[in-house]
Image (cartoon, rainbow, N blue to C red):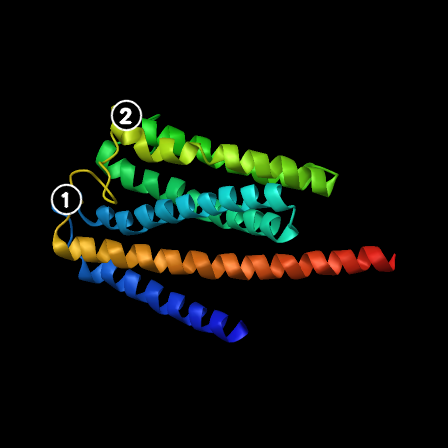
Amino acid sequence: MKKSYVLLSILSYVAILASLYMALIYAPTEKSMGAVQRIFYFHVPSAWVSFIAFGVVAVASFLFLRSGAAKWDLLARSAAEVGMLFLTLVLLTGPLWAKPVWGVYWTWDARLTTSFILWLIYMAYLMLRSYVVDRERGARFAAVFGIIGFLDVPIVYMSIRWWRTLHPSAVIAGSDGSGLESSMLQTLLVCVVAFTLLFITLLIYLYQSTMLSDEIEQLKTTDS
C-alpha cells in the first residue's frame, strides 16, 4: 500500500507539473479575455473535483448508515475536507476571472450563488462533526446531512441551463460541445486528470492520517 501510494504521489506531481506547463505555456492566449482566461484551466478542474469529492461523501455516508462501519464515516469526513479545499479554490479563482470579464468580482449569478450555498452546506457539515459531543450520534447526523447536501451538486451543475446566467456555458459534458480549440481542450483535459489524481492522493493521505489519529485517541482513552 505504501509503495503504491508513493507511485500515486509521484504520478500526481508529474501530472500537476504537466498541467501547469500546458495551462501557462502550451495553451494559446484567448483573444477576447487575454491571459486571465488561463485561470479557467484551474477553475474548472477544481469544480469538477469538488463534485467528485461530495459524491464520495454521499456514497460513503449512505454506506455508513447502512453498515455502521467506521471506515465509511472516516472516508466521508476525509472526502468532505478535501472537497472543501477544491471548492474554496473555485470560489477564489472565479472572482479573479470575473473581474476583468464582468467588471465585478462577485455577482449573485445563479451558478455563483448555488456554488456558495454548496460551500456553506459542507462547511456546516464539518462544523457539525466538530461540535457534537456524542461522536457516534454526530457521525449519523453528519451522514444524513452529507447525503442531503449532495442534492445541491446537480443544481450547481444545471444552474446555467435552468436560469439566465452570466457564467459561461458548460465545457464538460455540455450539450453543444466544449467550444474550445483543440490545444485548449487538450490542456483542459490534462488539468482535469491532474486535479483528479491530486484529489485521490490527498484523500488517501487524509484518510490514513485521520485513521491513525483516531486509533491513537482510542488508545489514550483505553489507557486512561
Q: Which quadrant of the figure contains the C terminus? A: bottom right
Q: Residue at x 45, y 44 (%)?
A: 55
On the image, the x and y values in percent for residue 168 come to 23, 36
Residue 124 showing in the rendered view: no
Q: Is residue 76 left or right of residue 213?
A: left
On the image, the x and y values in percent for residue 6 come to 48, 72
Residue for badge 2: 162
Q: Residue at x 22, y 57 (%)?
A: 187
On the image, the x and y values in percent for residue 60 come to 54, 47
Residue at far right of view = 224
Q: Camera-side residue: 84 or 99? A: 84
Name the quadrant containing residue 28: bottom left
Q: Is residue 34 left or right of residue 120?
A: left
Q: Earlier in the sequence, mark 1 or mark 2?
A: 2
- Element on which disc 1 rests: loop
- Element on which disc 2 rests: helix
- Above or below residue 128? Residue 85 is below
Q: Camera-side residue: 189 or 89? A: 189
Amino acid type of the residue that numbered disc 2 sits on in the rendered structure: Trp
Residue for badge 1: 179
Q: Callout 1: few (<14), some (14-19), or many (20+) C-alpha neighbours within 10 Å?
A: few
Amino acid type of the residue that numbered disc 1 sits on in the rendered structure: Gly
